[in-house]
Amino acid sequence: MSGTFAPAPGRAPMRAVLRSQVRMELTLTARRGEAVVLAMGVPLLVLLGAGLTHATNVPGGDRLAFVVPGVLALTVMSTAFTGQAITTGYERSYGVLKRLGASPLTRPGLLFSKIAAVLGLIVVQLLVLAAVGVAVGWRPHFGQLLPAIGITVLATAAYSGLALLLASVLKPETTTAAATFIYVLMLAAGGIMFAAPNLGTAGWFILPLAAHAEALRQTLSHDAAVPGSIWLSLSLWTLVFVSAAARKFRWE
């Protein structure tokens, strides 16, 4: 009969599911304004304090060429790792992830949505901080911009994988402590606001923040290519931790 309601239950296409989840992740992130401010506040203080004063020792004669790329890398870690680990840990504790587990969203789909949403937020943060850097005297080069973007996407995935892994296997309070400790350790040893001991190529594999910061210095400050060892180190970090997060991720 024409006009008769004929229900056709079925699962929505995965593309639509992922698009909806990414949008929700971005909305929830926007509502946590204090977390966004904190994720940018610390890097901004480092940029202005270390970049415009001589409170720390940096190699070379151009302080901003050293500090600003390091601050951009620090921002990526702040958002993709520290903030995401803490947020996801409490989402699991409060039962948010358990409810998502009853939806058509798969575990890989949730991981993809979280990484994509974080990447969108990072783009905005990096543009703001880069603009501040330019305003205070940093003069970036754009000849190697695409490799800089590529290495930043890779670093974002690596940090997100580690964050989601910690949030899956630890209690929220322990996740917060572990994420904060790793963040402080990376900040202290990563050569962001002062010259760190040169660990050579091995350092890129031990300290991903240092590897990312050096890649951005080479590309944006010196118009040089990203060293192959840095590509390899961040690729390994991404492969190991994203794979581990996909295997170990728990809805509750």
Image (spheres, rainbow, N blue to C red):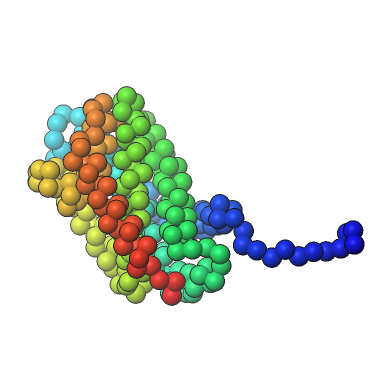
Which quadrant would residue 213 be assigned to in this image?
A: top left
Picture layout, residue 223 above or below residue 160: above
| Residue at 72% across, 63% down | 8
Left or right of 79: which side holds 217?
A: left
Which quadrant would residue 62 be assigned to in this image?
A: top left
Q: Is residue 207 visible?
A: yes
The residue furthest front is: 1
Residue 113 image offset from top left, x and y in percent: 47, 55
Picture layout, residue 145 above or below residue 200: above
Residue 182 image offset from top left, x and y in percent: 24, 60
Q: Is residue 29 visible?
A: no
Residue 163 image offset from top left, x and y in percent: 34, 60
| Residue at 34% across, 74% down | 171
Indicate the quadrant containing the C terminus: top left, top right, bottom left or bottom right: bottom left
| Residue at 51% across, 57% down | 25
Picture layout, residue 184 above or below residue 55: below
